[in-house]
Image: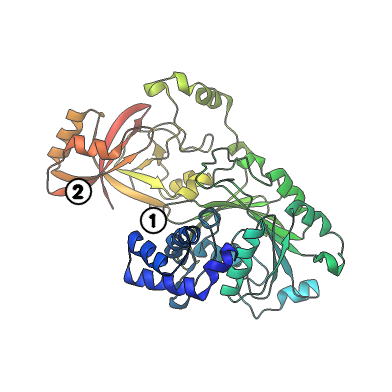
Amino acid sequence: MQPWDLLASDSVQGFIEEALTRKWDALQVSTALQKAGYSNEDRAAIMDYMALVPKFREKFANNETARGMFLLCDKLALEQSTAQDIGRWKANLWPHGNDATSDATENATGADAEVHDLCCGMGGDSFYLPAGLKVTGVDLDENRLAMYSHNMQAFGKNARTICADVRQVAHENDAKMPASAGMTKTDYFTIDPARRALEGENQRDLKNLTPTLEEVIEISRHYRGGMAKLPPGYPPAEIPDGTEILYLGGHSDCRECLVLFGELAKHPDTVRAIIVGKAGETLAEWTRRRDRSLETLDDDLQEKLDRNDSLEGKDRTYRTATSRSDLPLGEIGKYIAEPAPVLIRSRIFNEAALAHDPDAHLISEGIAYVSSDKPLPAPGFSCYEVLAHTEIATGAVRSMLKEHDIGKITLKLRGVKLDPDAEAKRLKPKGKNSAILFYTRFRGEKIAILAKKL
């Protein structure tokens, strides 16, 4: 029996459902599996899979029926897949969006349009495709294709699969293939290049993708349109002209940089930042024309960054904002605000801040804390009223906390490295009130800012 056959069996899924309902611990699960006659290898596979079940149900389910579904995946496939909120939002970018009854695609192509889900993995980018689109999953890994087929059926969708190199499939897409090849001319593509080869591997080189962005650009030339999911921090200067760049995430994260090609790029050479709600709705959106001068660092700042390892204190440059798109520097004002991550990644936080307070500014170069005399609104900003500030020294910070009767703190760090838990224990705050304590930089020097959330 193949591992996926074992995990997809009614007996194993029934066992897992019972174990989750009864909230068995690992020892109880292992003992029950042993009594049921499973081998050591099968017990390990079942227990590893069982740990993923609550995670994929949370990531992909948004109704009672879906919460009981069983998908096939491993840890890496689950981590790299697109969650249901972003997946549902992206569905609206395709022809006739989420409207399964529309015939707009048929009118445009003469038949049902088809999408190649390249590097399809477990299927996260296919689960929420509009019903009017045909879909084919393409991957070099047969295990991933087995996951994909099972999961698409779980979502009530029919999909073909092709085990092949996605680059070759794109080239062959230019000509009608014989039926034996299993491929026909396809209109659109979606691709999520691999970022890690092994579970637990931390991929720090954002440009080390498989296939590379250069290869994705070549792939895009063989389709009428498509989309590529890149890491949020991917260097935007590498992305070609004529595309549309979208930064997608929730209130507190930026999960992907989505690049639209061809017909899907309705607004070419623009950059958008979108905060997406739990059901896939747009909570907030900002747009700017693409400006390549914002995508590269000026020579002076690049030199500072290159020399950072040998610098200390105020001479060191911290990069949690952008360069030529940054706001001017100023004093610590009445309010301090954290821009939403999608605004930082998209280089739009400065425009969004100035729209509400023309005097908004940064308090230190390269750190995305915006100070202002007017509160900056949610969801683009998390805004705090400044109570006091002092140097980062244990005695000084303790005195500031005592003066404001602070007994509970939430520590936020930018430009300062330390262990938050250890620092909270060291400060030993005692008081009736709670507050936010920022450890950051003011004109390059370390500073502690005490504030309360609006």
Marker disc for residue 378: 1
Across and down, in percent, residue 366 comes to 45, 33
Task: Give the distance between the C-alpha atoms of the residues marked 1 and 2, in whole angstroms.
Answer: 21 Å
Across and down, in percent, residue 28 comes to 33, 64
Provide the residue designation for mark 2.
434
Residue 406 visible in this rendered orientation of the protein: yes
Residue drawn at (20%, 38%), measured in percent from left and top? Answer: 425
From the viewer's perspective, is 137 left or right of 315?
A: right
Across and down, in percent, residue 26 comes to 35, 60
Nearer to me, 76 or 64 = 76
Looking at the image, is 245 positioned above or below residue 35?
A: above
Q: Describe the element under mark 2 as helix, strand or loop.
A: strand
Who comes first in sequence, dot 1 or dot 2?
1
Looking at the image, is 122 positioned above or below residue 167?
A: below
Q: Quadrant of the N terminus?
A: bottom right
Q: Amino acid at mark 1?
A: Ala
Nearer to me, 176 or 239 = 176
